[in-house]
Image (spheres, rainbow, N blue to C red):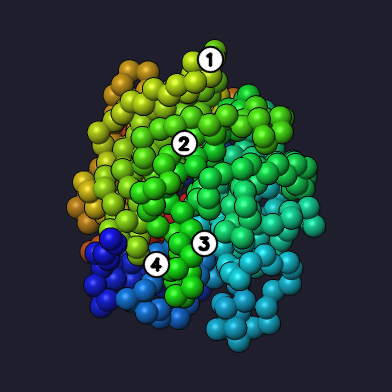
């Protein structure tokens, strides 16, 4: 039996800093406390749900809000501008009295609210569950809906993995109408070069995947499409399924999909892996593991405390060793993007309050997985950070030699700032605080997109 923990008039995803902002703002020459590090030249981008029209609090799911992109342009030690713009889905365009943006659509929903990435000098807002990417210009205006110039046959994902050696994007895409998931590889020219069907047991919500230098890894977990909910008009018809089981699929990267090997694990859910790598005959997977998901609460992720775990898949014996790495409740794990698919020592995340999964507790955490220690930056009472993105100090800097960037909401002023921390001194004061003209609602993911010269 499923019950909803959120009362109709008190939907927590529509209150406080979850509540949407209404205006699209452009501000120049942002005030800065401290000094922006030399050499930072690019845009810090973040995206999240932001309903353009008031939704029904009884049924609104956090994951379904219209997309809004936020960005700060940094160059020559200055914060040149802040912008926020709605991603122009058909619904947003109609609400604003605009003509729909051009380009191809896939499925009934054509918005994007989950991640924002730079690919081959272009900027894409992305989401999962069958939708196409939405291309934005450098100032976050919607250009067009995109199927990567006709090379993407169905939908894409919110979480492509960038191979730092080849420069290609690897993705696992799902869509309830398909009898399989799709392993997609996007070349450095932003064109899809490979689509490989991967058979799964049903219709799972596969939010993310992992990548090693030798393998693509898929998470077939017990949050699945609920046809009855979809028929009743639920905009997010995915829920915990006790009968589905949980398993990890490991596929040698250039082999056909039918060669995927499946390994059973204890039932759980993973939105976000930290990183993965090959080690001899094993595949090492560091993930943020939730005990359940969309079970008691169908309106958001509130089913137990998530924490960092390691799954070691032994390809020789066919077994998986499961071990908890930290008892800190956290989400939004990130590593230095230059070592995705390679062995890592450090990981970063956002700390949470106990079992209340999306109550941010004001800390960015740093794990040293070699020493087994965890440090945290405390932003203080009433100040809540989002996902922290690592930016290396230089292209050849050592792992952890760089900066962490995150938007922080201050409840007292109801404004946000972009905070820049020194990763090697995470407990110290921010090296720079960029003061924004409004608040940035709690959202999902973003990236540092360096300027291409």
Q: CA distance from mark 2 to mark 4?
A: 27 Å
Pointer 3 residue: 113
Pointer 2 residue: 247
Residue 213 locus on image (x, y percent):
62, 25
What residue do we see at 67% from left, 65% from top? 106
Pointer 4 residue: 61
Helix, strand or loop for disc 4: loop
What residue do we see at 46% from left, 36% from top? 247
Which quadrant: the C terminus?
top right
Q: Mark 2 or mark 3, which is nearer the start of the sequence?
A: 3
- Circle nearer the viewer, 3 or 2: 2
Residue 396, can we see it?
Answer: yes
What residue do we see at 72% from left, 30% from top? 254
Which quadrant: the N terminus?
bottom left
Residue 35 locus on image (x, y percent):
43, 44
Q: CA distance from mark 1 to mark 4?
A: 42 Å
Give neighbour class at mark 3: few <14, some 14-19, many 20+ (Cα, 10 Å).
Answer: many
Tell me the tag on residue 316: 1
Vertical comparison of 62 with 180: above or below: below
């Amino acid at each position: 039996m499923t019950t909803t923990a959120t009362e109709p008039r008190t939907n927590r995803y529509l209150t406080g800093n979850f509540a949407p902002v209404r205006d699209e703002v452009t501000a120049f020459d942002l005030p800065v406390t401290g000094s922006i590090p030399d050499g930072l030249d690019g845009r810090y981008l973040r995206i999240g749900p932001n309903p353009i029209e008031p939704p029904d609090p009884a049924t609104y799911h956090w994951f379904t809000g219209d997309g809004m992109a936020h960005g700060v342009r940094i160059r020559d030690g200055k914060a040149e501008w802040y912008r926020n713009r709605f991603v122009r889905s058909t619904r947003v365009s109609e609400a604003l009295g605009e003509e729909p943006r051009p380009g191809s659509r896939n499925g009934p929903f054509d918005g994007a609210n989950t991640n924002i990435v730079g690919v081959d000098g272009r900027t894409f807002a992305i989401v999962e569950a069958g939708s196409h990417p939405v291309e934005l210009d450098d100032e976050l205006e919607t250009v067009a809906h995109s199927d990567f110039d006709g090379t993407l046959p169905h939908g894409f994902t919110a979480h492509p993995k960038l191979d730092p050696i080849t420069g290609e994007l690897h993705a696992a895409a799902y869509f309830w109408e398909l009898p399989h998931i799709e392993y997609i590889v996007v070349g450095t020219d932003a064109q899809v070069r490979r689509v490989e069907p991967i058979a799964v047991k049903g219709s799972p919500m596969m939010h993310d995947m992992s990548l090693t230098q030798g393998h693509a890894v898929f998470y077939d977990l017990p949050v699945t499409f609920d046809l009855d909910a979809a028929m009743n008009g639920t905009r997010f018809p995915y829920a915990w399924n006790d009968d589905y089981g949980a398993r990890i699929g490991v596929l040698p990267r250039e082999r056909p999909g039918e060669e995927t090997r499946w390994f059973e694990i204890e039932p759980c859910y993973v939105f976000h892996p930290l990183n993965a790598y090959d080690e001899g005959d094993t595949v090492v997977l560091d993930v943020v593991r939730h005990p359940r998901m969309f079970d008691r609460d169908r309106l958001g992720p509130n089913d137990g405390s998530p924490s960092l775990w390691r799954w070691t898949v032994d390809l020789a014996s066919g077994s998986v060793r499961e071990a908890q790495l930290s008892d800190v409740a956290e989400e939004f794990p990130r590593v230095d993007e230059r070592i995705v698919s390679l062995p890592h020592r450090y990981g970063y995340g956002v700390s949470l309050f106990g079992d209340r999964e999306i109550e941010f507790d004001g800390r960015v955490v740093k794990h040293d997985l070699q020493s087994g220690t965890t440090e945290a930056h405390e932003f203080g009472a009433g100040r809540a950070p989002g996902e922290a993105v690592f930016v290396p100090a230089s292209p050849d800097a050592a792992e952890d030699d760089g900066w962490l960037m995150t938007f922080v909401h201050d409840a007292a002023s109801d404004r946000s700032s972009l905070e820049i921390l020194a990763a090697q001194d995470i407990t110290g004061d921010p090296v720079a605080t960029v003061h924004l003209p409004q608040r940035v609602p709690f959202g999902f993911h973003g990236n540092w997109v360096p300027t291409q010269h």
